[in-house]
Image (cartoon, rainbow, N blue to C red):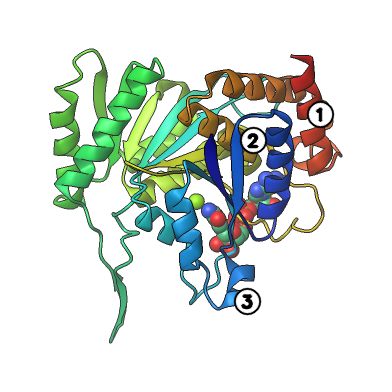
Amino acid sequence: MHRICVIPGDGIGPEVMEAALTVLKAMELDMEYYPALAGNACFQKLGTTIPSQTVDQAQQAHATLFGAVTTVPGQNSAILTLRKKLGLYANLRPVKSYPGIDAIYPDLDFLIVRENTEGLYAGWEEYTPVGAQALRVVTRKASQRICEFAFNQALENGFKRVTAVHKANILKKTDGIFRDTFYQVAENYPELEAEDLYVDVTARLLVKNPQHFQVLVTTNLFGDILSDEGAGLVGGLGMVPSANIGDSNALFEPVHGSAPDIAGQGVANPTAMLLSVVMMLHHLKEEKAANKLEKALLIVLKERRFLTPDLGGNSSTLRMAREVQDNLDAL
Ligand code: NAI
Ligand code: MG
């Protein structure tokens, strides 16, 4: 039996979570769901964006599903706290184009592996007499761990090339360590091609020639930015899922946020959340269920049945999810 911690969050978080749970529960897997609070609504109620009970629930679960939260300046980021407390050092962000969806490129399939614990998001930011400053943290240990993770992901998913993305010409020490560690790790994977690129060059190539990329491995901030760029190439934020993986915990969430501009209307695209569920099912070794759910979703996308407005349709979140569920039954 799998214990799943469920954190719907704010805005469209609960809307896409409801859709995903409807479909997931219809699959009748051996799973138990434990709801937990986090985010801004939680703060209004309990005075904290991430109660310790939520962290405990997530720690005890085999996997956590996270919707999205609204981050208010001055409040602790619930997702950053969870990533830190659960030791979720690897953030996997697959970017895939799906038939039927109006993507800039119809043939993309690459994976961004983002270091999730340090870089410029280490949380060391302070005011100074003249402004403010932030510290960029890069350790050999975290660099090695994330690079090994990226090469292993390449092997597991049949990719042939791993690209390290950095800015070592300017950030000579921090990104120098990241790049050098990458090539040390690469020596253990002679069957895979290893290359490195500057982040600005990568940003350009992602627009001009994204088919070049297979697995990209990079530090926290660059990974955050490039994965939004990736989302833009394949139909928008409603289309891209992510996994946050650690040694003993894992959390799955769409790349998008709480989307206050469309929250409450019931029209958020559930695809990113559903694909995050697919990633969770793979992680739990429920391969059959993972493949079945992805297939059911792909039929809905390809045949453009009951799509949400961001994909050019006029259906609601739940209507689209119900269509996925109906396809499951037919498979
Ligand atoms: P966002 O991802 O929430 O929205 C950006 C744009 O994409 C909006 O126009 C939105 O309507 C659209 N969009 C996003 N997801 C969609 C979906 N599933 N279906 C259709 N359209 C979708 O990013 P934004 O506006 O920068 O941030 C809003 C809030 O979310 C902020 O408070 C931010 O801090 C938070 N946030 C939370 C994240 C998380 O919980 N992991 C990640 C990113 C942002
Ligand atoms: Mg982001």
Going by the picture, which residue comes out furthest to the right?
314
The structure residue drawn at horizontal position 66% and vertical position 53%, both measured from the top left corner, is 13
Distance between mark 2 and mark 3 Cα atoms: 28 Å
Q: Is residue 49 above or below residue 266?
A: below
Q: Which is nearer the N-term, disc 2 or disc 1? A: 2
Rate crowding at label 3 as few (under 14), some (14 to 19) or many (20 or more) other CA atoms within 10 Å.
Answer: few
Label 1 packing within 10 angstroms: few (<14), some (14-19), many (20+) = some
Task: Please state, as top left, top right, bottom left or bottom right, where the N terminus lies in the image.
Answer: top right
Disc 3 to disc 1, C-alpha distance:
35 Å
Residue 292 at what x, y percent from top left?
Answer: 64, 19
Which quadrant: the C terminus?
A: top right
Q: Secondary structure at mark 2?
A: helix
Which disc is residue 44 wearing? 3
Looking at the picture, tell me which residue is in the foreground, 33 or 120: 33
Tell me which residue sits at (85%, 39%) in the image: 315
Checking the image for residue 20, the label placed there is none
Tag 1, which secondary structure? Answer: helix
Give the amino acid at mark 3: Gln
Does residue 93 appear to the left or right of 258 in the view shown?
A: left
Label 1 is placed on what type of residue?
Answer: Glu
Whether residue 106 is situated above or below residue 224 in the rendered picture: above
Q: Is residue 77 visible?
A: no
Residue 293 position in % (x across, y down): 65, 24
- Residue 264 vertical position relative to residue 302 in the rendered view, above or below: below
Q: Residue at x 69, y 41 (%)?
A: 21
The residue indicated by pointer 1 is 323
Residue 133 location (% of width, % of height): 29, 72
Amino acid at the residue labelled 2: Leu
Secondary element type, mark 3: helix
Q: Is residue 101 left or right of residue 306?
A: left
- Say which residue label 2 marks: 274
